[in-house]
Image (cartoon, rainbow, N blue to C red):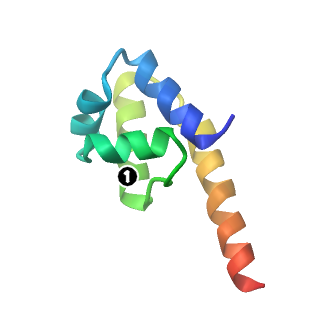
Amino acid sequence: MALSVSIKVLRQKSLMSQMTFAKELNVSPTTVNRWETGKVKPNLTAMKAIKTFCERNGYSYSDIENEWLSYENAIQWSEEK
């Protein structure tokens, strides 16, 4: 599953609007929207907030983390070329 979809599913499972989810993560609703549409990926600080959110609410973080790491590794690999 794509990172954008995983973030959206996490928010929807939590029965939260983008605005409420954004407040939980201390980011703007626009940022959440951009994550969910795949326009941008969460930075490290945001990923830590997502991890904390998952742990606090009993959701698995491993899939989201693996998708983010795959994306980050792909960027790093392409920058090295």
The mark tally for this picture is 1
Q: Is residue 74 found left or right of 39 in the rendered image? A: right
At a point 25% along the width and 46% down the height, the residue shown is: 28
Residue that mark 1 sits on: 46
Measured as percent of width and height from the top left, residue 15 is found at 36, 14
x and y percentages locating residue 36 in the rendered image: 48, 38
Residue situated in front as seen by the camera: 55 or 64: 64
Q: Amino acid at mark 1?
A: Ala
- In the displayed orientation, state which residue is furthest to the right: 81
Point out the image quarter for the N terminus. Answer: top right
Q: Is residue 55 above or below residue 17?
A: below
Q: Is residue 62 visible?
A: no
Nearest the eye: 10 or 59: 10
* Residue drawn at point x = 55 percent, y = 46 percent: 38
Could you tell me which secondary element the residue under label 1 belongs to? helix
Front position in the image: 45 or 2: 2
Q: Quadrant of residue 64?
A: top right
Residue 17 at what x, y percent from top left?
30, 23
**The C terminus is located in which quarter?**
bottom right
Q: Which residue appears at 43% of the width and 46% of the height? A: 34
Residue at 23%, 46% (x, y): give it.
26
Q: Callout 1: few (<14), some (14-19), or many (20+) C-alpha neighbours within 10 Å?
A: some
**Side of 56 where 12 appears, left or right:** right
Tell me if residue 28 can be seen.
Answer: yes
